Image: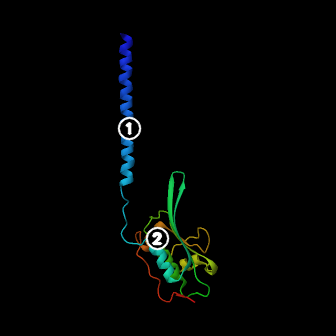
Amino acid sequence: MKTSSSRGDRDVTRRRVRSLRLITLSIGVAAVLAGCTTTAEVPDGGQSRASALGDLDSTGFTDVELLLTDSQNGFQSTKSTDLFVGLPEGAVINDQAAVLDYLLRTAWSVSDVEPDSSITAGFKGALEDIDWVAVGNADGLPLSDRTSATNPTLSVDDATSTFGPWPGDVPVLPAGAITLP
């Protein structure tokens, strides 16, 4: 009888373990499904990446890249918005500070992914000959030159104190800031 009694105890224990496993699995699946069905909160204001690209194109900028970057360093994730532009040959920048301000504000207004690290306005082609960090600093922007003088960068804290909360208002390039060929 002891044999059947201990066998019965083992069967009861196995059923309990299986039940606990099934409950744990069910809870895990429910948690995953709940996470998949929730929607991210959509921020007020700003503009989509697609809208920003359209505005930049209609303003005359060429070779536009608007990168929403999410980098992983160990367990820490950092997000940045990086905007790179060129201008057609023969274009003239009449107000460098206004162009830089417009591009940084455009990067800050993109509402697809909230940056938690920085925003950058980078320049290509003939625009690389300008020390954009010096232009921005002379205009009162607290810029760093993370990669070079042609890629002025604002930390998220500095962008918030300069442009207001993210996502910022959709900027308009001041008339006459650029003369296109």
Q: Quadrant of residue 17?
A: top left
Q: CA distance from mark 2 to mark 1?
A: 41 Å
Taking depth in this image into account, of 164 and 8 the one nearest to the observer is: 8
Q: Which residue is mark 1?
A: 24
Taking depth in this image into account, of 75 and 87 the one nearest to the observer is: 87
Residue plotted at (47% across, 79% down): 55
- Give the SS element for disc 2: helix
Measuring from the top left, give residue 42's x and y in whole percent: 37, 64
Q: Between disc 2 and disc 1, whose residue precedes?
A: 1
- Residue 37 visible, this orientation: yes
Residue plotted at (47% across, 77% down): 54
Measuring from the top left, give residue 35's x and y in whole percent: 38, 51
Quadrant housing the N terminus? top left
Q: Pointers 2 and 1 in contact (CB under 8 A)?
A: no
Q: Which residue is mark 2?
A: 49
Give the crowd class for mark 1: few <14, some 14-19, many >=20 residues within 10 Å.
Answer: few
Q: Amino acid at mark 1?
A: Thr
